[in-house]
Image (cartoon, rainbow, N blue to C red):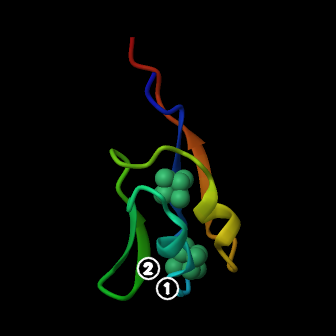
Protein backbone atom coordinates (compact mmCIF):
# COMPACT_ATOMS: atom_id res chain seq x y z
CA UNK A 1 0.00 0.00 0.00
CA UNK A 2 1.70 3.26 -1.07
CA UNK A 3 1.77 6.17 1.40
CA UNK A 4 -1.24 8.47 1.21
CA UNK A 5 0.48 11.62 2.30
CA UNK A 6 3.67 13.48 1.58
CA UNK A 7 5.39 16.48 3.09
CA UNK A 8 5.53 19.82 1.31
CA UNK A 9 7.77 22.74 2.30
CA UNK A 10 6.77 26.37 2.08
CA UNK A 11 10.04 27.84 0.80
CA UNK A 12 9.12 31.31 1.92
CA UNK A 13 8.79 30.25 5.54
CA UNK A 14 11.74 27.84 5.73
CA UNK A 15 14.76 29.19 7.63
CA UNK A 16 16.98 26.26 6.50
CA UNK A 17 17.70 25.16 10.07
CA UNK A 18 17.98 21.50 9.05
CA UNK A 19 15.85 20.11 11.91
CA UNK A 20 13.59 18.28 9.47
CA UNK A 21 16.49 16.55 7.73
CA UNK A 22 17.67 15.05 11.04
CA UNK A 23 14.21 13.66 11.83
CA UNK A 24 13.36 12.05 8.52
CA UNK A 25 13.60 8.24 8.70
CA UNK A 26 13.74 7.97 4.91
CA UNK A 27 16.33 10.58 4.08
CA UNK A 28 13.65 12.21 1.97
CA UNK A 29 14.22 15.83 2.93
CA UNK A 30 17.30 17.91 2.30
CA UNK A 31 18.39 21.53 2.21
CA UNK A 32 18.60 22.78 -1.35
CA UNK A 33 21.76 24.85 -1.88
CA UNK A 34 21.61 25.95 1.75
CA UNK A 35 18.46 27.93 1.05
CA UNK A 36 15.37 25.88 1.85
CA UNK A 37 14.24 22.33 2.46
CA UNK A 38 12.96 20.17 -0.37
CA UNK A 39 11.17 16.83 -0.13
CA UNK A 40 11.81 13.88 -2.39
CA UNK A 41 8.19 12.90 -2.84
CA UNK A 42 9.13 9.44 -4.07
CA UNK A 43 10.93 8.63 -0.81
CA UNK A 44 8.58 10.37 1.61
CA UNK A 45 6.25 8.08 3.56
CA UNK A 46 4.20 10.90 5.08
CA UNK A 47 5.16 10.10 8.67
CA UNK A 48 4.98 13.75 9.74
CA UNK A 49 8.19 13.78 11.79
CA UNK A 50 9.60 16.68 9.80
CA UNK A 51 6.40 18.66 10.27
CA UNK A 52 6.61 18.24 14.06
CA UNK A 53 10.29 19.17 14.12
CA UNK A 54 9.96 22.34 12.08
CA UNK A 55 10.24 25.49 14.24
CA UNK A 56 8.94 27.70 11.43
CA UNK A 57 5.78 25.75 10.64
CA UNK A 58 6.86 25.55 7.05
CA UNK A 59 5.98 21.89 6.44
CA UNK A 60 2.51 20.67 5.57
CA UNK A 61 1.38 17.12 4.88
CA UNK A 62 -0.68 16.86 1.73
CA UNK A 63 -2.73 14.04 0.29
CA UNK A 64 -1.33 12.33 -2.77
CA UNK A 65 -3.43 12.18 -5.88
CA UNK A 66 -5.19 8.85 -6.19
CA UNK A 67 -4.05 6.96 -9.26
CA UNK A 68 -6.19 3.94 -9.93
S1 LIG B 1 6.89 13.14 6.27
FE1 LIG B 1 8.37 11.69 7.18
S2 LIG B 1 9.26 10.63 5.41
FE2 LIG B 1 8.28 12.48 4.61
S3 LIG B 1 9.91 14.00 4.52
FE3 LIG B 1 8.83 14.24 6.50
S4 LIG B 1 10.02 13.01 7.97
FE4 LIG B 1 10.58 12.36 5.88
S1 LIG C 1 12.78 22.27 9.94
FE1 LIG C 1 11.47 23.75 8.84
S2 LIG C 1 12.62 25.68 8.85
FE2 LIG C 1 14.06 24.01 9.36
S3 LIG C 1 14.95 23.39 7.36
FE3 LIG C 1 13.18 22.06 7.74
S4 LIG C 1 11.47 23.07 6.69
FE4 LIG C 1 13.09 24.59 6.93
Residue that appears at 53% across and 31% down = 4
Residue that appears at 62% across and 53% down = 48
Q: Nearer the viewer, residue 35 or 21?
A: 21
Q: Earlier in the sequence, mark 1 or mark 2?
A: 1
Q: Residue furthest left?
A: 33
Q: Nearer the viewer, residue 8 or 21?
A: 21
| Separation (CA) of disc 1 from disc 2 | 5 Å
Residue 58 in view = yes
Is there a contact, CB below 8 Å, between mark 1 and mark 2?
yes
Residue picked out by circle 2: 36
Q: Nearer the viewer, residue 29 or 68?
A: 29
Label 2 residue SS: strand
Above or below: residue 40 compared with residue 31? above
Q: Quadrant of ligand 2?
A: bottom right
Task: Judge the density around disc 1: few (<14), some (14-19), many (≥20) Cα neighbours within 10 Å.
Answer: some
Asked if disc 1 is less than 8 Å from ligand 2, the answer is: yes
Residue that appears at 68% across and 79% down = 56
Residue picked out by circle 1: 16
Residue that appears at 61% across and 49% down = 61
Locate residue 51, reporting x and y percent.
64, 62
Amino acid sequence: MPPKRYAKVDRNRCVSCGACTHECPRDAISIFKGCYAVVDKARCIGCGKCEKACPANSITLLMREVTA
